[in-house]
Amino acid sequence: MKKDNAILWIFLHPPRTGGNTIIETILKKFPREEIFMTSLKRYDLDTEKFDKNKVRFMLGHATYYGIHNLVPDKQPKYFVILRAPVDRLVSHYNFKMQEEKKKIPFDEWYKNQIKNEMVHFLSLKFNGSESSRIPTPRILMPIIKRLNYKSVYFIQTIFFKILRLNKPNKREGLKKLEDAKKLLDLCWFVGVAEKSKEDFKFILTSIGIKNPQWINDGVSKKIIKINEKLRQKIYNENPLDVELYNYAIKLREKKLAEIKNTKK
């Protein structure tokens, strides 16, 4: 593996986009001292110490734009993987429900999900937030950790109704979309899960792994499958995520061309 210690690789990791596959591959191929893993266990960054001279990767759901300032002497290269909205949502539901004995019906689960969640997620990251959602007050965390999924789900339902996160203000939504697009523009590379075979190989090769091999991590049981009616419902109710995903597909081609030109 070729090393370039002057580069700091930072993975912005939206849930259910295949990112764990990339992370697990990196963890197996590089020394642990070169990897700073972030954590959302307390809805803030892990306080794990790291050597600024040795660290080459920042990974995990709690990365954000600006985290490179912790290692000011290296060139940051942010990258992200997005996924078609309906596929990501169904995957998220299947993942949540696979261990539950009594399943919550998809429609009931879905109505309490943040609409246009990827726009919301990337807007938070662009504005320097470690969290991928509105952070849970720390005073409640000891209680939350003791509850089962159904209890947490009930609290989340009430929380969403109070904050109306599943019915965002139109002006707010457009501002978040603008922020999300700006973040994608700032990334070294923007991949999509639907082209994971190509994009995972491109990312892993670029960071120095020759002939990368990986096992898809986090594959969940297919409790429900996508049909055309469900696809249209989700697309109609998440128009900003659809627009962002289409923007990412076009940007992906542009980024690939730019990277290839700089290598010539």
Image: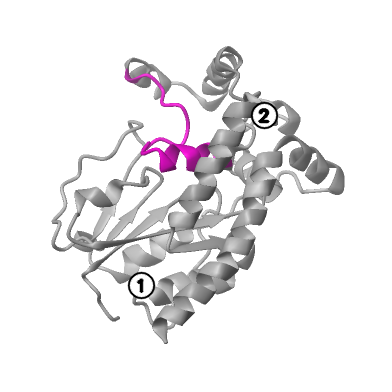
In the image, what residue type sits under mark 2? Trp
In the image, what residue type sits under mark 1? Ile
Name the quadrant containing residue 135: top left
* In the depicted structure, whether residue 264 falls above or below residue 157: below
Instruction: Say left or right for 70 vs 205.
Output: left
Please report the bounds of the magenta region as a residue range.
119-138
Name the quadrant containing residue 174: top right
Which residue occupies 64% across, 63% down? 194
The residue nearer to you, when weighing 194 against 257, is 257
Label of residue 207 in the image: 1
Judge the density around disc 2: few (<14), some (14-19), many (≥20) Cα neighbours within 10 Å. some
Query: Would you say residue 127 sits in the magenta stretch?
Result: yes
Total numbered badges shown on the rendered structure: 2
Q: How is the image coloured?
A: one colour
Which residue occupies 25% across, 74% down? 4
Q: Secondary structure at mark 2?
A: helix
- Residue at far right of view: 229
Which residue corresponds to mark 2? 109
